[in-house]
Image (cartoon, rainbow, N blue to C red):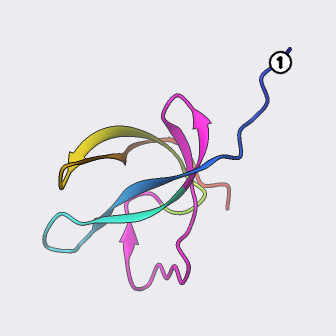
Amino acid sequence: MAAMASNIKKKIYIPLLDEGVPVLRPTLGIDLGGNIFEVLPTDGYDPEDEEWEFSPGTIVECVLEIRDGEQVLVAKKKIANSKN
């Protein structure tokens, strides 16, 4: 039986650019398997207000990091361009 694409959404963190200090924005990503996710926008996403390293629609590879004592998925590498 062939594997079907997952529509499971998980919380991932996107680095923000030009903030002066390292900042991560939590958002949801569609789990494509193997720590690969399609970035989804937050409610009220405004690219004029925050510059995300990986914009919504981008396919990214995430790595597990420990932040404030918990494991989180942080986007580290673009796999494919935005679908937009």
Quadrant for the N terminus, please.
Answer: top right
Q: Is residue 80 visible?
A: no
Residue 71 x, y percent position in the rendering: 30, 44
Quadrant for the C terminus, please.
Answer: bottom right
| 51 falls in the magenta region | yes
Residue type, numbered disc 1: Ala
Residue positioned most to the front: 69
Q: Residue at x 52, y 28 (%)?
A: 34
Residue 28 x, y percent position in the rendering: 53, 59
* Relative horizontal placement of residue 30, taking residue 17 as reference (left or right): right
Name the one closer to the observer, 19 or 36.
Answer: 36
Q: Residue at x 58, y 61 (%)?
A: 40
Q: Secondary structure at mark 1?
A: loop
Q: Residues within 10 Å of mark 1 (few under 14, many from 20)?
A: few
Q: Which residues are magenta?
A: 29-54
* Relative horizontal placement of residue 17, taking residue 31 as reference (left or right): left
Q: From the viewer's perspective, is residue 29 above or below residue 42?
A: above
Say which residue label 1 marks. Answer: 2
